[in-house]
Image (cartoon, helix red, strand yellow):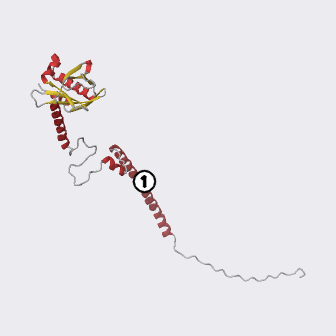
Amino acid sequence: MSLDSFVNLDDLAQVIYQGTSRFILLSSVQFDSSPQKWELHVGVMDIGRWWSTQWPVEDVKEYLGNEFSEEKLEELAEELTEAIVSRALSLDGWTTPPPNRGTRDLRVIFSLKGKNTLVLPLKELTETEALNYTTSTLFSLGLNAHQRKCRINPPTYATSVETTYTHRPVPDHLSKRARSPSFSLPESDHDDANKQISNKIQSRSSISNAVVGKKQMLKAAVRPIESETTTSAPKTRPRIVKKKARTVQAMEFASDEE
């Protein structure tokens, strides 16, 4: 039997506020240990004290009892993960002012589905154990930061692995302010726009072809008429008729006396 189903409980961290006190809860799964176990560490701010508990695989099996199965194990892991993420948990035994070191243990209570609760006792670490755990936790944090170019948290902007510049690169969210915003259409809109443009080009080409065809038809119809008129009409110059003036003779009439 293994705790492979508890993989989601590995490397979890949650902040707990209880009264005026602040706590940090760290969850981890020791897959390499024998037997495998789930570990919880709870630290309180300002005074640097730690409590811890372990839940071996045999204790998990005992908690499930007759209902133990791989499916039930996965359901329990999901419920515990959800309880940590949603802060459905509390600490019992803490007082203000805090108790003296080593005089009181705490309990962490998980609120699970179906009004079920899981109570795990927390034993306080000695001062040396607390310092060792703090140092080992920070060392693991440093190893993870080494993969991000020594940054504790992942950067909010993309950076290249290798660079020849000596100054720090300008973040994208700052450099974008200096540039004018660019507008890009989705692929579907690009396709529609291209189709509209191609349709317009085709319609314009068809119209121009029709106009050219009509012009050619008109030219073809006019050319025969011009040829007929030019061949049938004789090329003669207009004749100028000169008329001669007539001589007018005076007419004599006889008088009545004769």
Q: Is residue 178 left or right of residue 258?
A: left
Residue 143 in the image: above or below residue 34: below
Residue 86, position as x, y percentages in the image: 28, 28
Judge by depth and name the residue closer to the eye, 40 or 95: 95
Q: Is residue 49 left or right of residue 213?
A: left
Q: Residue furthest right?
A: 257
Residue 126, position as x, y percentages in the image: 16, 29
The residue pinned by badge 1 equals 207
Q: Is residue 190 left or right of residue 116?
A: right
The local crowd at label 1, few if under 14, some if 14 to 19, many if 20 or more residues have their Cα within 10 Å, is few
Residue 229 in the image: above or below residue 35: below
* SS under mark 1: helix
Pick the quarter of the image with the C terminus.
bottom right
Judge by depth and name the residue closer to the eye, 258 or 150: 150
Instruction: Count all numbered tags in the image, as a single digit.
Output: 1
Q: Quadrant of residue 73?
A: top left
Q: Quadrant of residue 84?
A: top left
Residue 15, position as x, y percentages in the image: 27, 31
Residue type beneath disc 1? Ile
Pick the quarter of the image with the N terminus.
top left
Q: Residue furthest left?
A: 34
Residue 170, position as x, y percentages in the image: 29, 50
In percent of the image, x 20 and y 42: which residue is there? 145
